[in-house]
Image: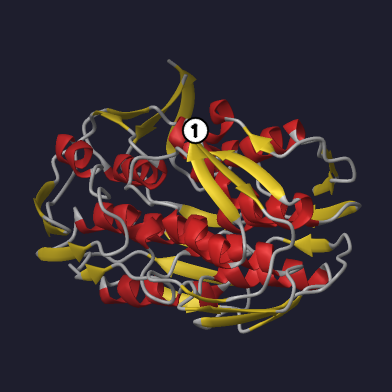
Amino acid sequence: MDKILIKGGKPLNGNVKVSGAKNAALPIIAACLLTGGSHQLQNVPLLRDIDTIKRIMSKLGVTFRDEKGTLEVNSDDLQGHEAPYDLVKTMRASILLLGPLLARYGSAKISLPGGCAIGARPINLHLKSLASMGVDIYLDHGYVNASVGQLKGADIFFDVATVTGTENIMMAAVTARGKTVLKNTAKEPEIRDLADMLRSMGADIEGDGTDTIIIRGVEDLRPARHTIIPDRIEAGTFMIAAAMTGGHVTVEGCRPEHQEALMEKLEAAGANIKVKEDSVLVRGPDTIESVDLKTMPFPGFPTDLQAQFMALMCIAKGWSMIRETVFENRFIHVSELRRMGADIEINGNQALVRGKDRLFSAPVMATDLRASASLVLAGLVAEGGRTEVQRIYHLDRGYEALEKKFKNLGANIWREKE
């Protein structure tokens, strides 16, 4: 098992290129199950979660080939419809195989998903929606067993806007008989990227990016070529790191329109930001000002950047209130930040942060993907030796070569075996 070590105190300077978005790539790879042929996907990040979904789909008969930055996905010869527990337990996004398997195969057996520890995130909205499309579902020994003769269109209202639920039902509906209307859908950019992929395959979809998506089922789909959008959470992590270290960093290959909520908060904290077509320049302030924060679904401030922004507030001037409204249990990084000298009080879904002049290096343990990133950011400014971040396999699920990118920006950071 690897760990990351950091000697803090160096401002970050230079340019960094953002990788493809994990949360867009996973459903798009799953969508390749919908039809046979060879799909060509570009800008696919090299991540543990990507490897996991490839391993699961390989067990179903899908073949993969990486060549010159392109992932070729061939699903001509599906040989099964079961996603086993030993793989699904490591990644919640495995449930995204349910919709396309039902659309293509009429049957699916998916282990109830595992993944990180940021909350229950039940899949009842997925199952309720599929049932309204004619799917027979029963749970048995930890598996979702689902079957259908022909999926049928339906009017579906999500009680809570769910990203994976929206994606799963979109994929199920593209070949369903008739029209499917999804209401109170998630609006995240990853939803729109999946819709673009499905349209390239011949699907009839409109309304993605709004709270109502209309899908008219088609009889046939075709293999597609698609480029994954940049990872807005990775881009945001580098932007926060630049502000936190007093650095001067250009984040390249991103989409600034996906960062508007973050940029507003960083400017309020004192950072200077310049936006170009596909890059954002962040200059860190001399003094970081405290800013209150409330996480919300897109286009609000993303929950996946809450832990990183909290690390920034730990060295801000004054008090800040951070309110988490998307996931429960998403303050589990707080105890580790406290080990580094942070002053944080938790009351339900609110964290009161009193900024300190400095943080101190310490051995810390990552508990989930974004918590891992917050501890690395804290380590970049910590004084008094080196910070050791353990259990970074969480980090490798969602960040491609993070320590190498930080090192190229001037950070004193490296990876070692435990």
**Going 43% across and 31% down the picture, which residue do you hit?**
392
Query: Foreground residue, 70 or 27?
Result: 27
Q: Nearer the viewer, residue 105 or 297?
A: 105
Q: Could you tell me if residue 20 is visible in this image?
A: no
Q: Give x and y (percent) for residue 345.
A: 8, 51
Q: Amino acid at mark 1?
A: Lys
Residue 77 in view: yes
Q: Is residue 53 left or right of residue 85?
A: right
Q: Position of residue 183 (x, y in %)?
A: 50, 80
* Vertical side of 389 occupied by 279: above or below: below
- The scheme the figure's colours follow is secondary structure
Establish if 150 lies above or below 360.
Answer: below
Circle 1 packing at 10 Å, graded few (<14), some (14-19), many (20+), is some
Q: Position of residue 162 (x, y in %)?
A: 45, 65
Which residue sits at x=42%, y=36%?
A: 412
Tell me if 34 is positioned left or right of 336 in this view: right
Q: Secondary structure at mark 1?
A: loop
Given residues 273 and 195, the one toward you in this image is: 195
Which quarter of the image is occupied by the C terminus?
Answer: top left
- What x and y, as percent, mark residue 296? 34, 70
- What residue is shown at x 37% (from left), y 75% (from top)? 300
Q: Which quadrant holds residue 218?
A: bottom right
Looking at the image, residue 3 lies above or below residue 354: above
Tag 1 residue: 89
